[in-house]
Image (tube, rainbow, N blue to C red):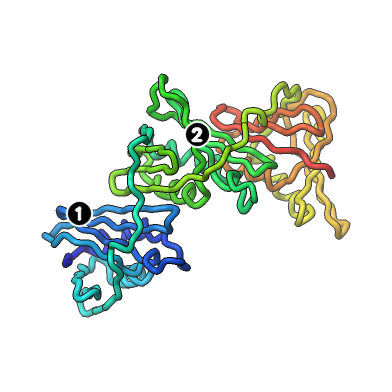
Amino acid sequence: MQFSILREDLLKPLQLVVGVVERKQTMPVLSNVLFAIENQQLSLTGSDSEVELIGRVTLAEAADDGEITIPARKLMDICKNLPAEALINFRLDEQKMLISSGRSRFTLTTLPASDFPQMSEQEDSFSFELPQGNLRYIIERTSFAMAQQDVRYYLNGLLLETGPNRLRAVATDGHRLALCDAEAGIAEDNAPHQVIVPRKGVLELARLMSDENANVRISLGANYIRAVGKDFTFTSKLVDGKFPDYDRVLPRGGDKLVVAQRQQLREALNRASILSNEKYRGIRLQFEQGLLRAQANNPEQEAAEEEVSIDYNNSLLDIGFNVSYLLDVLSVMTSTEVRITLSDANSSALLQEGDNSDSSYVVMPMRL
């Protein structure tokens, strides 16, 4: 195996796949990147056995076909520290990869490509396309609400659900829920599909969606999701479990509507949160005609109070929330106004953007 490539051409796919490679691996070969050359195309594969990412680049010069695995982090550090526009030469010699560029020489140990586990495509997959920007949008709007290390493992991921011409993302940690829809090329006569993508897969998928207008092809199998773009193929195993019936969680029939300036409310809650209890993050919200009063205090007997003008014409309501949950929602929104629908002090709040209903957020109240 022998080939040459410009530093910049190699860095792009290498940076893509190294993000998947874990530093501490039970299998030594998973600390490596699989290099494979076929018909002038170099593919780089990184995997942690749950998530696999393949980056592709076409070689400018003739190269021998072949495959081998090379230590990921060391190769990454070598490439990053070579000068810009450097030409890097690779030559495999008796299971050692000899790398040269200008006056620099490196010898890296390799492991056979046959040791590297690869995820194969399944026949029964359901596929559709959507713009990368749409997929990134729904992930960014919902992924913050995923649980982090919940024993209910199905909450440590993101639900993707297909429907006619749309893809929906839903995340919940049991205390709050985030839901967002985006347009996708799914025919109306297709049966709905539901999959739960694990946390690492979700974050990697969002990172890959860098070309907003380019399409990405999504395939959903029985136990994997695959995303194929122009220069990458991403595959992740799915979480095997039943996601909660999120539709039952969405509050219905709330009779108290609050409209507020999103940024103004966010800044006020941010200031009040400084003196909230560091562990429980509780904040008391008092809604009255045209005014919201936010109050926080902590075990050191310190207190904060903020007043915000709002559009509200209903009875007095006093309700407590985890202020971090409210701030997370207000941070991912982009609209000028936020709509909050409430029923009473013991019922969840529904938050939506003032100018669209693509996203819905549910936050459970807390007793203070």
Q: Quadrant of the C terminus?
A: top right
- Element under disc 1: strand
Total number of numbered labels?
2
Residue 365 place in picture, x, y as percent: 76, 38
Please rate how many residues cluster around mark 1, counting C-alpha atoms within 10 Å: few if below 14, some from 14 to 19, many from 20. some
Q: Nearer the viewer, residue 223 or 43?
A: 223
Query: Mark 2 or mark 1: which comes first in sequence?
Result: 1
Question: At 54% from the left edge and 34% from the top edge, which residue is drawn?
Answer: 180
Q: In this rendering, which labeled residue sits more in front, label 2 or label 1? A: 2
Question: At 69% from the left edge and 38% from the top edge, which residue is drawn?
Answer: 363
Q: Nearer the viewer, residue 292 or 144?
A: 144
Instruction: Specify whether residue 326 is in view.
Output: no
Tell whether 54 sits left or right of 326.
left
Position above or below: 221 against 105: above
On residue 41, which mark appears?
1
Q: Which residue is mark 2?
A: 194
Residue 265 place in picture, x, y as percent: 69, 40
